[in-house]
Amino acid sequence: MKDSHKYIKQFPSDLKALDQILSWFDQLNQPSIPKKVWLQYQLALAEGFTNAVRHAHKDISSEVSVEIEFTIAPQRLELRIWDWGPPFDLEGKLRNLNNQVDQESGGGRGIAILQKIADQLSYTRTDDNRNCLLVAKSY
């Protein structure tokens, strides 16, 4: 992407790192990004990281890091969260989402939130045995 800026950082696979992640992310904010879009991306980052730690890395040492890549381009944002967990069928989960979401539950709505925020949402396995959650949005 022309005129884009990419930021990459690794964080411990620990929910306690979320404050550090959000602090790092806030430093990347730019005046050209609408406030509503920025707040949605903060939420997407928190949900994506939390899912990586709770689900993808639940049986993996906390020494294994989660990599976060954030790209700011004119009128478009892309968030990628890389984990080392087992593969996960995001498309299948999205198809069954409406039947499974418990509105009374304290959790379980992260994927639905990501789907509402993103113009493009995917979770793919890479050749190096990592998974990449992509949350992309044009504004």
Image (cartoon, helix red, strand yellow):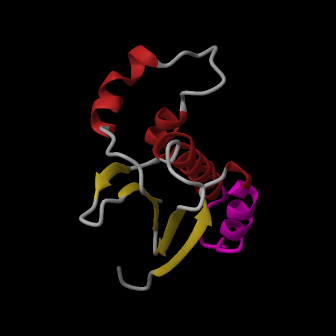
Q: How many numbered badges does the structure rendering display?
A: 0
Residue most toward the left? 127
Q: Quadrant of residue 12?
A: bottom right
Q: Nearer the viewer, residue 80 or 50?
A: 50
- Verify whether residue 33 appears in magenta: yes
Against 48, residue 99 (above or below) is: above
The residue lying at 65 percent from left, 74 percent from top is 28
Residue 63 rendering spot, x and y as whole percentages: 59, 61
> Which residues lie in the magenta part?
17-35
The quadrant in which residue 104 appears is top right
Q: Residue 21: where, in percent of width, then height?
A: 67, 63
**Does 38 lie within the magenta span?**
no
* Residue 103: x %, y % from top left: 59, 16
- Measuring 68% from the left and 49% from the top, which residue is drawn there? 15
Residue 32 shown left or right of residue 115 in the figure: right
Q: Quadrant of the N terminus?
A: bottom left
Q: Is residue 11 left or right of residue 19?
A: left
